């Protein structure tokens, strides 16, 4: 089945930081967010931290091409390697194309 180039691409990044994670992680995360925001098609990024310490990061791009630009960005790729070497105990990444969306907001 072909991917719809107009479907939002949603990355669900679940992670656990090492107990001794350096402040540098948070500086790098801020720099990466600014880099992602510079990609045409970036929609948003949200980070949530559960009571047990697991982190959930949602990253949304409005199309597959924008997501792929972020996925293959050399600075992002280098940061991923650093994450495995220096910052994370574990992570799990799921990428999905949104096939339906419904929103409501009180006026």
Image (spheres, helix red, strand yellow):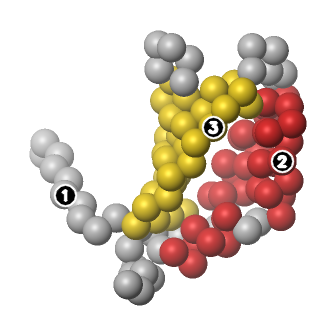
Asked whether, in this view, residue 98 is left or right of residue 77, the answer is left
| Circle 1 residue | 102
The residue singled out by tag 3 in the image is: 91
Structural crowding at the residue carrying mark 1, measured as other residues with C-alpha within 10 Å and reported as few (<14), some (14–19) or many (≥20): few
Please state the horizontal and vertical placement of residue 40, each as a whole percent of the image: 59, 72
Q: Nearer the viewer, residue 77 or 38?
A: 77
Residue at the spot 47% in from the left edge and 20% down from the top edge: 50
Question: What secondary structure is found at the residue carrying circle 2?
Answer: helix
Visible in this render: residue 47?
Answer: no
- Return the disc, 1 or 2, that comes first in the chain's sequence: 2
Q: Is residue 2 left or right of residue 17?
A: left
Residue 38 position within the rendered picture, expressed as x and y whole percent measured from the top left: 67, 63
Tell me the tag on residue 81: 2
**Which callout, 3 or 2, points at the residue further toward the start of the chain?**
2
Residue 7 percent coordinates (x, y): 38, 73
Seen at 50% across and 58% down, the residue is: 95
Element under label 1? loop
The residue shown at (77%, 56%) is: 76
Q: Nearer the viewer, mark 1 or mark 2?
A: 2
**Quarter assignment of residue 21:** top right
Upstream in the sequence, badge 1 or badge 3?
3
In the image, residue 47 sits, relative to residue 64, either above or below, namely above
Query: Which picture quadrant has residue 42?
Result: bottom right
Relative to 99, residue 15 above or below: above
Depth order, front residue of 92/27: 92
Q: Which quadrant does the N terminus fall into?
A: bottom left
Q: CA distance from mark 3 to mark 2?
A: 12 Å
Residue at (42% x, 81% y) in the render: 3
Mark 3 neighbour density, 10 Å: few (under 14) some (14–19) many (20 or more): some
Left or right, 104 with respect to 49, comes to left
């Amino acid at each position: 089945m072909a991917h719809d180039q107009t479907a939002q691409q949603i990355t669900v990044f679940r992670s656990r930081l090492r107990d001794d994670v350096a402040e540098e992680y948070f500086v790098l995360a801020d720099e990466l967010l600014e880099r992602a925001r510079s990609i045409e098609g970036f929609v948003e990024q949200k980070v949530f931290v559960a009571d047990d310490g697991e982190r959930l990061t949602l990253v949304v791009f409005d199309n597959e091409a924008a997501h792929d630009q972020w996925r293959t960005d050399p600075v992002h790729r280098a940061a991923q390697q650093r994450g495995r070497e220096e910052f994370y105990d574990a992570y799990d990444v799921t990428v999905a194309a949104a096939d339906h969306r419904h929103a409501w907001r009180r006026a």
